[in-house]
Image (spheres, rainbow, N blue to C red):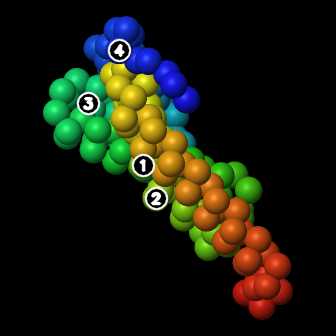
Amino acid sequence: MGENLTGRKDHSIIVAALIFMLLAAIFAVIVFKQINPGKFTLPFYFLVMGMFFFATAMESESKLGEWLASLSWTLNMLGFVLFYQRVTGNLQSWIYMWPLVFPSGIGVGQVCYGAVKAKKEPIERGKALIKMGFGLFILILVIFKLFFSKILF
């Protein structure tokens, strides 16, 4: 891509503070309004854990921060997949959605970490993982929908 990120500023403290304030506001609304997420409780908690780990990753200057960002977006992707399944009732999608959680979630975490920390290497690694994850997702989706949908479902 030829992007030069050396001139960009590191905005990690701002991003972390905004995420922590957003999480605190969400929990305050849930507690004070006594909202029960019902069937969306599990996806909600995965998304909250993921955002908490991502905000924590923004404050780390070591390799641990990049690792935490990857873990956080893996949890977020798992939460998004569970949310999709709860909304649509398509529980069979577990068969072909795992590539969105594992390689793609790690890739999104590295891209986000690199973008906030103004580092080019995590962005490039993350882009490759995202492409690999979406490619596997499409391949497995096509294989299972064409060959196994009548047998399994």
Depth order, front residue of 146/7: 7
Residue sitting farthest toward the left:
62
Tag 4: amino acid: Thr
What kind of element bears circle 3?
Answer: helix
61 shown above or below 101: above
Chain-order first, disc 3 or disc 2: 3
Tag 3: amino acid: Thr
In three-dimensional space, the C-alpha distance between marks 4 and 2, rounded to whole angstroms, equals: 30 Å
Q: Which residue is mark 1?
A: 106
Q: Which residue is mark 3?
A: 56
What kind of element bears circle 4?
Answer: loop
Left or right for 143, reference 72: right
In three-dimensional space, the C-alpha distance between marks 1 and 4, rounded to whole angstroms, equals: 23 Å
In three-dimensional space, the C-alpha distance between marks 3 and 1, rounded to whole angstroms, equals: 16 Å
Tell me residue 98's x, y (percent).
54, 64
Q: Tell which tag, 3 or 2, sits nearer the viewer.
A: 2
Chain-order first, disc 4 or disc 2: 4
